[in-house]
Amino acid sequence: MSFKSFGVTLIELLVVLAIVGIAAVIGMPNLAYTISKVRMDGEINAVLSGLNLARSEAVKRGLTVSVCPSTNGTSCAASTSWSTGWIVQLDGPPSQLLQTTAALSRDSLVSTSTATPAYPQFTSMGYTFFDSTLTLHDTNETESLRRCIAFSAGSWVSRSGAACP
């Protein structure tokens, strides 16, 4: 008489679970880093999107447009921290809100500006006199995850990792 088994034995099940467990332990740190990297890239891209919108609207309307930190989503805050959100606004008259961006998830976006105003304002020619750096970093200050936007001579460049000041 021959028996055919269509199931798995307990030993086979334990071996598969051990292999899956080892793979998970090895892969989890890389997965967490990748998720953080994608989140940081998305957040800095949101800032770049706001800057591009402000520049194009300034040229299109022939007026000054600001990108500034905001705590209430309706007006500029006198702060160098952008972590609570930021707005793009037409400086008017009359002042007009063009875009509002909510607070960051867990990361910190800070301007190193000591000038007034402490945020970029684009002229009708699309030029900004803002000379500073916006730096985005995670709660652990991981250097490889750091992102920044450096402004100088009327333009900006996005950098990451050790290239950020």
Image (tube, grey):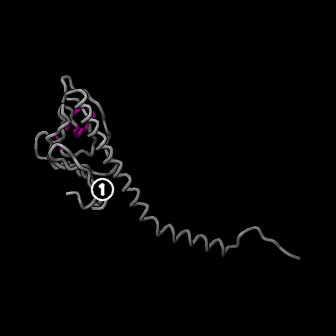
Where 78 falls versus 35 (above or below)?
Answer: above
From this viewpoint, which residue is outermost toward the right? 1
Residues 48 and 111: in front is: 48
Residue drawn 33% across the image and 51% down it? 106
> Mark 1 — residue?
138
Q: For residue 127: magenta?
A: no
Residue drawn 22% across the image and 33% down it? 75
Where 159 falls versus 22 (above or below)?
Answer: above
Task: Quarter of the image for the N terminus: give it.
Answer: bottom right
Badge 1: how crowded within 10 Å, few (<14), some, or many (20+)? Answer: some
Instruction: Using the rendered view, name the quadrant where residue 144 is placed.
Output: bottom left
Residue 107 percent coordinates (x, y): 30, 51
Residues 46 and 79: in front is: 46
Q: What element carries label 1?
A: loop
Residues 111 and 84: in front is: 111
Task: Quarter of the image for the C terminus: give it.
Answer: bottom left
Residue 135 percent coordinates (x, y): 23, 52
From this viewpoint, which residue is outermost toward the front? 125
Residue 82 lies left or right of residue 11; in this view the side is left
Residue 5 lies left or right of residue 83; in this view the side is right
From this viewpoint, which residue is outermost toward the left? 115
Instruction: Using the rendered view, name the quadrant where residue 80 is placed.
Output: top left
The span picked out in magenta is 67-79
Residue drawn 67% across the image and 73% down it? 10
Q: What residue type is labelled 1?
A: Asp
Residue 3 lies left or right of residue 103; in this view the side is right
Residue 4 lies left or right of residue 129; in this view the side is right
Residue drawn 20% across the image and 44% down it? 155
- Prevailing SS of the magenta stretch: loop
Q: For residue 76: magenta?
A: yes
